Amino acid sequence: MLRYTLMRLGIFVGCLVVVWGLVYSGLAPRGLGDSNGMWIVLLALLLSAPISFVVLRKERDRASVQVVQRVDRMKANLEANRSQEDEAADQAAPSQGQTPQTS
């Protein structure tokens, strides 16, 4: 996941440098007043998003598999903890003079 994030950041920085060069060379329009910096960042974001979507497809798929595995592992751990709590509650009920309820 970190690798994917760093690769996206790298693509954004590359686009930022290219857009900055185009704006200051006069090939791309400048922002209005003091908004030039914001204009450059927004234009770089606009360009880097589709590039990242196409170029990083395989890396994004790998990252999503890792996320799914992590979520499945967390669900399994939660289920194991629930069953341990149920067993502990069932064992504690007879010792308190209560009878376990069956359905």
Image (tube, rainbow, N blue to C red):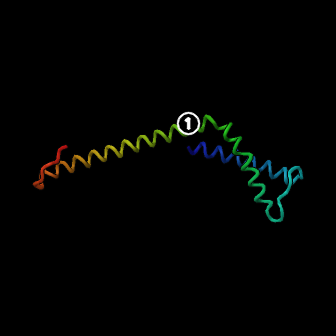
* SS at mark 1 in the image: helix
The image shows residue 42, relative to residue 63, as above or below, that is below
The residue most toward the top is 58
Residue at 88% across, 49% down: 27
Quarter holding the C terminus is top left
Residue 5 locus on image (x, y percent): 61, 46
Q: Is residue 96 left or right of residue 47?
A: left
Q: Amino acid at mark 1?
A: Arg
Crowd tier of the residue under label 1, counting other residues whose Cα lies within 10 Å: few below 14, some 14–19, many 20 or above:
few
Residue located 50% across and 39% down the image: 66
Taking the view exactly as shown, the residue that stands out farthest to the bottom is 34
Q: Is residue 72 above or below residue 24?
A: above
The location of residue 86, given as percent across then percent down, is 24, 47
Q: Splitting the image into 4 quarters, where does residue 37 fall?
A: bottom right
Q: Residue furthest right?
A: 26
Viewed as shown, does residue 16 lie left or right of 53? right
Q: Using residue 93 as the reference point, say whether residue 60 is left or right of it.
A: right
x and y percentages locating residue 89 in the rendered image: 21, 51
Count of numbered badges drawn on the protein: 1
Q: Residue at label 1?
A: 62
